[in-house]
Amino acid sequence: MKALLGGKGANLAEMVRIGLPVPPGFTITTEVCTYYYAHQLTYPKVLHAQVEAALERLETLTGKRFGDRQNPLLVSVRSGARESMPGMMDTILNLGLNDQTVEVLARRANNPRFAWDSYRRFIQMYGDVVMGVQAHGRDEHDPFEEILAKLKQEVGVEKDTDLTAGNLQELVRRYKSLIKRRVGREFPQDPRQQMWGAIGAVFGSWNNDRAIVYRRKYHIPHEWGTAVTVQAMVFGNLGNTSGTGVAFTRDPATGQKAFYGEYLLNAQGEDVVAGIRTPQPIAYLAREMPKAHAELERVRQTLERHFKDMQDFEFTIEDHKVYMLQTRNGKRTGLAAVRIAVELVEEKLIDWKTAVRRVPADSLSHMLAPVFDRKDRAEAEQAGRLLCKGLAAGPGAASGKVVFNAEDAVAWAQRGEPTLLVRIETTPEDLRGMIAAEGILTARGGVSSHAALVARQMGKVCICGAQEIHVDYTARLMRVKGRVVREGESLSIDGTSGEVFLGEVKTAPSEIVQVLVHKTLPAAKSPTYRQFAKLMAWADKLRRLKIRTNADQPDQAATAVAFGAEGIGLCRTEHMFFGGTRIDAVREMIIAETPEARQRALAKLLPYQREDFIGIFRQMKGLPVTIRTLDPPLHEFLPNDGEILRDLADKLQQPYEKIAARVAQLHEANPMLGHRGCRLGIVYPEITEMQVRAIFEAAARVRKDKVPVRPEIMIPLVGFPKELQLQLEIVRRVAQQVQAATKQKIAYTVGTMIEIPRAALVADEIAADAEFFSFGTNDLTQTVLGMSRDDSGSFLPCYLEHEIVKANPFASIDQTGVGQLMEMAIAKGRTTRPGLKIGICGEHGGDPASVEFCHRAGLDYVSCSPYRVPIARLAAAQAALKQQERS
Ligand code: PEP
Ligand code: MG
């Protein structure tokens, strides 16, 4: 149903079926949209007649007719894709009004103000969406809103609702002349012409910029298309016995089981979601309109029982009677997603596997997001830096430099400057900027404004409706209680409390991090942690993939184990080379021109490396630890600064010129493809020897203390079997020597990374020597695609824009290209060595889509950064569930 009718159309039909009050209407399917785009923006021939027939039925059902002088039919024309894309496409309300029917409506409702208000809204929406009358530049405000503001100023009122029927009639006149001026055509009076214009505009809005950006971000296929629902209008702006609102069956920010939402009396739906007026919390409705509130409470329960998930619904109250305009599964924060899923299981509405399926794996990162450091926050408050409060719309804490438009947020982020995007109201045009900014702050609008929903889903920190803020786009500044904050100044916002601070406020870790990593909060005191742990336990029951971590230091390893890592999948030994005075020894080793000189330097490094490995082995207590031998190009460790070079020459007691010449000699034109990886250990076997010695001496030391150890030695950048054989010989020889010397028997394995296409192609030969494979998909992607992992930033955005790639291939595995090569390497490797253990340790190991691919491809484990371990656990469980469902 959803594929054909779109989410909105299908759920309206569903609500009719379960007896909820829905105004009559009809839906034009997504197939028409697909046809429209496939046939040069034309409709199927039958469409006209079918829409006319449906319209006739609607007229019969409502007893109203389009353009009728006695009882005119007014409709809304709404978009609705298969998956909801809040606010990204267009909607038109009050269609059917014209210079005549507005008078009829005024008479029938006995309320001229209402009629003229509806008409001016219609012209405004139609003018914007169908006729394209919009703000010209990024510093300009919406032209209709400008006219409205000017009129309010002229007549001396503050609120829209204070405008009289006469004022609104004047507003209609000004709106119409704005349209005439801008597009050279009159606003159309014929309702049928209006309707077809609106239908075309809704189909057209499927391909507007923000919808495309949204689809790309959420991987919604462009082929799906949108449906169009035409529905009889009900009016929330009939006076103070009417209203409109948006509600959630549970709190979308925290997941708490509480009726959550907001409404405006005497208003139409767009007022709430567009964030132009700041609405009332739904609880107030119990006082203002108890009957309607009770009916909504019934709706809330019916919806949850039927859809078995948190719903986000729109309603209108027309003269005390509640109508449902839409329902959909509500967007939620990661925090809320976990709580709702776990509580729905406890309430027996869903089973535990459904709970695991429901929580988007990536959204767990919201739960691990920082909050303000308490002390720093208190100090900021005492120092009078608490500027104001708004509505908490997206949890977490963020600091950044203020920018006032989306384009700047994008540009500044590209320069590496964290920003906070400050807007008067949140509109969907801001999407690009919202993606780029650390957080979003708006002066107007409620927690259910479009952009607030989107921010939450993205896990962005967001505050809405901070009414004390007055933004001046043109001057690029905001005023708050007499203070002026200009573009580029620092601001901090807490999207959980709604507080806005001047300057930077330090952030502190999430509750889960406090329980698991810092151990400063007891689990019993954190329901959030307990729910997280429950979900993780369910996930662990389902997953087949093991989860390891990429860690080079004991504290990183400890964090990862606390998050559930079952071993280290990649320990990059070179990361240990930078600390303290080691870098001097490393540089000495590199500069060395004879094996003896090199060995002298390596001897200095050995104790450091041994200590590092002891720390890691102790921490991992017998869990497998994959240690990779030296990988990066050596000159990465060399100074290019004259002064440091001079200092190095002094330390090594060698002439500056000689050192400088050696450094120049080591320079490579293309270091990523140069002297790195196992090529280092082959040309300088003494480096591998030192590292292997450090590993085994550390292992022996730790074993002596009765702590089990499981080292796995991994050779990087292998492309030829002989490369591995040469390194293997060193590993086996040194391991033998150390074991004999220490009288400790250490079980270990030796394997290789598969990160060069040639290694994948000859994986069967390599597997003769390798006891395990680990895909280095960072380098494999770089070499298969021929795209530098360090330089792709300059062209990848354009590639994404053109959909040459569906996702950044360095973040999510290019399954058809790189993935194909991986599948081949897996098959070949296991032909030679059945049961060959295979993992992945590139950045992709923490990406849910890549984890799913790794599950399907038959990998044994994925390895990712510590904070992504929970995400990988959940993604692995979801991959297993998906496979169960398929078979
Ligand atoms: C890889 O290439 O995927 C990998 C894990 O190694 P590195 O990122 O250190 O090159
Ligand atoms: Mg690599």
Image (cartoon, grey):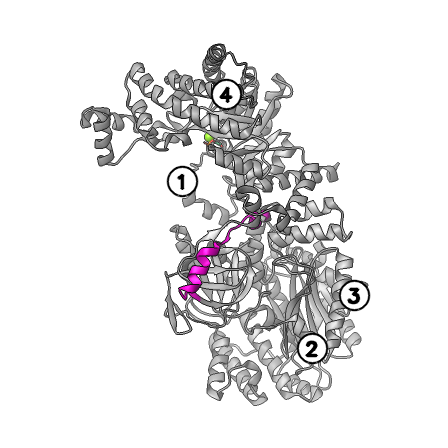
Q: Which residue is drawn at 68% across and 75% down?
A: 285
Horizontal and vertical percent position of residue 879: 66, 39
Reading the chain from its start, which is encountered first: label 2 or label 1? 2
Element under label 3? helix
Element under label 4? helix
Q: Residue at x 53, y 20 (%)?
A: 703
Element under label 2? helix
Residues drawn in magenta: 364-386
Above or below, 333 against 618 in this view is below
Number of other residues with Cα within 10 Å of mark 1, as a class: few under 14, some 14 to 19, many 20 or more: few
Reading the chain from its start, which is encountered first: label 3 or label 1? 3
Number of other residues with Cα within 10 Å of mark 4, as a class: few under 14, some 14 to 19, many 20 or more: many
Q: Mark 1 points at which residue?
A: 791
Reading the chain from its start, which is encountered first: label 4 or label 2? 2
Q: Which amino acid does label 4 sit on?
A: Ala
Magenta includes 371? yes
Check whether the beta carbons of the residues at disc 3 and disc 4 lie within 8 A of each other. Answer: no
Reading the chain from its start, which is encountered first: label 3 or label 4? 3
Q: Name the residue under label 2.
A: 287
Q: Name the residue under label 3.
A: 16
Cα separation between marks 4 and 2: 71 Å
Q: Is the C terminus in the top left, top right, bottom left or bottom right quadrant?
A: top right
Q: Which residue is drawn at 60% across and 82% down?
A: 117
Above or below, 668 against 598 in this view is below
Q: Name the residue under label 4.
A: 699
Whether residue 271 is visible to the viewer of this picture, yes or no, is yes
Of badges 4 and 2, nearer the viewer stands 4
